[in-house]
Image: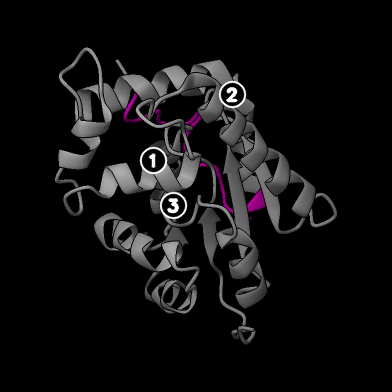
Amino acid sequence: MFGILKKREKIFCIGFNKTGTTTLAKVLEDFGYRLADQDQSERLFRYWKERNFKPIIEFCKKADAFQDIPFSLPFTFQVLHFAYPHAKFILTVRDSEEEWYESLYRYHVNLFGDGKTVTEEDLQNAKHIWKGWAFEVNQHRYHPPKGEPYHKETLIKSYKTHNYIVEEYFHDKPDSFIKINVAKKEDYFRLAQFLNKKPLYDDFPWLNRSK
């Protein structure tokens, strides 16, 4: 499949968007890790759709830490764990799946919609990354019913399934994996210990909070 790459410290943030990934990126940057360019990362979605992970693995040579798409998409973390067996994986979660859904929906309503709602047509016309990228991601990640891109039950099931699979995969690999909630102060210190870093502040610097 893919060859195992030489030992290098890599950090992969594999929690869904709107689980505090922007906050986590800030923490990692302050710890001295080089973060991958977000726009370049999201363009790798075209390869993920084809299950072509070689360009994603190659991209990971450019930085130390990676977040969001395609790293939070299904199958990616397993491939990266094989390619980078000494990497550390961080799963970010919210207090509840309901809270995650509401945060994601509000964010996308403002980013892609009219401030009140967001439709398939809005996603198809959104020019983030490339026109229609938002729609493609929505369809391939969540597989919602036609015409209901934010079907609540479907999205929540996807969120819960992802977290379950991640935790099951890493359940016997404590040196490689941690699950955190950036709303919990104690998790900042758990993360610092996991990364063998000295804490720089007393809590997570929560960024990009949904209004």
Question: Of the residues shown, which amino acid type is indicated by label 1?
Answer: Asn
Eyeballing the image, is 51 above or below 128? below
Asked if the stretch drawn in magenta spans residue 185, the answer is no
Q: Which mark is residue 67?
A: 3
Task: State the count of labels.
Answer: 3
Question: Of the residues shown, which amino acid type is indicated by label 3?
Answer: Gln
**In contact (CB < 8 Å): disc 1 and disc 3:** no
Inter-mark Cα distance, 2 to 3: 20 Å
Name the residue at 50% across, 50% down. Answer: 72
Lower sequence index among marks 1 and 3: 3
Q: Nearer the viewer, residue 54 or 177?
A: 54
Lower sequence index among marks 1 and 2: 1
Mark 1 lies on residue: 138
Q: Nearer the viewer, residue 71 or 20?
A: 71
Tell me if mark 3 has few (under 14), some (14-19) or many (20+) residues whose alpha carbon lies within 10 angstroms of its own: many
Type of secondary structure dominating the magenta stretch: loop
Lower sequence index among marks 2 and 3: 3
Inter-mark Cα distance, 1 to 3: 17 Å
Name the residue at 53% across, 23% down. Answer: 183
Name the spot of residue 205 as percent of width and height, x first.
40, 31
